[in-house]
Structures are given as C-alpha cells and as structure tokens.
Amino acid sequence: MFKKLFGQSKSEDDASELVGGGDNFGTPEDFPVTETKPRKDTIIKILAIGDSGCGKTSILDRYCTGKFKTNTAPTIGVDFLIKNTEVGGAKVKCHLIDSVGQQMFRSITFAYYRGVHAVMIVFDVTSTDSFDNLRDWISNVKQYAQEDVVVVVIGNKVDVPQRIVTTYEASEFCKKHNFKYFETSAKEGTNIDQAFNDAISQVQNNLSF
Ligand SMILES: Nc1nc2c(ncn2[C@@H]2O[C@H](COP(=O)(O)OP(=O)(O)OP(=O)(O)O)[C@@H](O)[C@H]2O)c(=O)[nH]1
Ligand SMILES: [Mg+2]
C-alpha cells in the first residue's frame, strides 16, 4: 500500500508524477475514512435479571465496590447503585438496577425494563435450571424492554469446580440469540469489568456517541 501511494520516486521530478493520478495513487475507496468522533459523557442504565441466587447482587457489588460479600440476602423488589466509570474515552455514570429473582415478586420489576439501555441476564453455571430459565428471561426482555436494548448474558460462579453448564453450550445458546456472553466470578472478580464495559460500549455504539 505504501508503494502504491508514494511510488518509488526519489527525485523531485519523479515526484511530480505522483501528482494528478496515474497508476501510483490508490482510489479513494482504497483509503476509507474511519470516523473518530469522540464519545459523549453520558448516563447509561443497566438492569440485572436472572434466577434467584445466581449472583446478581454479588456481581453488581463487585463491580461497584471491588468487594465480595459472602452474606448477601435475597433482593426484595429492586435496589439501585451508581458507578462512575470511563469507557471509550468518555465518562459514564452507570445507573445499575438490581432486581429480585424470586418468581413470586418478579412482576414488580417489569416496570423497570422499559427505560434501560442494557440488560445483563445472569445465570449460575452450577445450576441447569438457571440456564434453562434464560428463555423466560429473554421473553420478559422482549416483552417489556425497548427494542434496541443491549443484552449481555453472564454465566456466573465459574470459580466453583463443580460447574454443570459448559462454556460451549452457553456460548452456542448466546450465539443463536446474537447476545454477547461472559463467564464471571463475583467471588474472585473474574471478567466483571469486561462484561460491563462491553455492555456500555455496545450502548454507546447504539446511541452513536
Ligand atoms: N462461589 C461463588 N458464589 C457466589 C458468586 N456470586 C454469588 N455467589 C453466592 O451466591 C449466593 C447468591 O448470591 P446473590 O448475589 O445474593 O444472588 P442474587 O442473584 O442477587 O439472588 P436474588 O437477590 O435472590 O435474586 C450468595 O451466597 C453469594 O455469596 C460467585 O461468583 N462464586
Ligand atoms: Mg439479589
């Protein structure tokens, strides 16, 4: 490409050949202009859903505080957290919504789906049920969230040696649905920032920041 653009001329006379076309220049199509618009500082709302006990509260706590609490109580209704971060060179204030996983209280969380930019659907890699129930969670997202919502699936508790759901089956499932998939451990802090950064970055792209 370098040769094609600048030819191999050494003298000024030769250089004149380079002006005005000829074989030495590539066409504009050879040099597409990539947009490098700066991203805007913004507020991004992210909702965590998934079966009770899969680790939603622990993941959000880990993301916000960098710590893991061993004695989390089941979430009742919804909780709110805020995390200030920087992604793609822009400051982001994340409004994080933690929701109850227990079936009997779920319906009260549906009102919170509507206004969020991203949903993290969490399952527990040691629980087949929590993986099988992803279908129900996805259908709730389709029913209650906005159409362009970013969905990221998280397989949590990968620190536990007796995992049941394999990386292969989870990632194949996500590929089919066109969702990004991350395996995390809230306990050890594995992949937590990566999962949130990816969701934020997808939202930034959606909003053309
Ligand atoms: N080993 C291990 N345990 C975890 C991990 N994440 C959460 N836990 C444990 O799993 C249990 C449930 O975690 P929570 O974060 O309360 O689960 P939740 O999804 O918020 O549950 P609900 O609020 O009832 O919907 C707790 O005992 C946590 O300590 C993890 O990554 N590894
Ligand atoms: Mg919880």
Image (tube, rainbow, N blue to C red):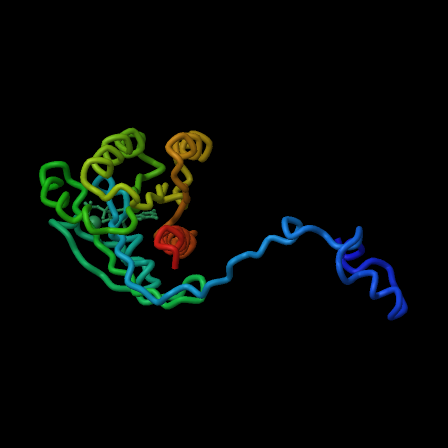
The mark tally for this picture is 0
Q: Is residue 111 above or below residue 197?
A: above
Determine the image quadrant of residue 92.
Answer: bottom left
Q: Residue furthest bottom?
A: 12
Q: Residue at point 38% right, 39% down?
A: 179
Residue 98 vs residue 6: left or right?
Answer: left
Q: Which residue lies furthest to the front in this view?
A: 20
Q: In which quarter of the image is the C terminus?
A: bottom left
Q: Where is residue 189 in the image (x, y as percent from the top left)?
A: 39, 55
177 and 102: which one is in front?
177
Residue 59 vs residue 4: left or right?
Answer: left
Q: Position of residue 126 (x, y in %)?
A: 34, 36
Residue 197 vs residue 51: left or right?
Answer: right
Determine the image quadrant of residue 157.
Answer: top left
Q: Residue at point 35% right, 54% down?
A: 207
Q: Where is residue 163 in the image (x, y as percent from the top left)?
A: 39, 36
Q: Residue at point 35% right, 63% down?
A: 66
Q: In this view, does 166 lie above or below 14?
A: above
Q: Position of residue 137 (x, y in %)?
A: 24, 36
Asked whether the viewer can see residue 189, the reply is: no
51 and 21: which one is in front?
21
Q: Is residue 182 above or below residue 19?
A: above
Asked whether the viewer can see residue 130, the reply is: yes
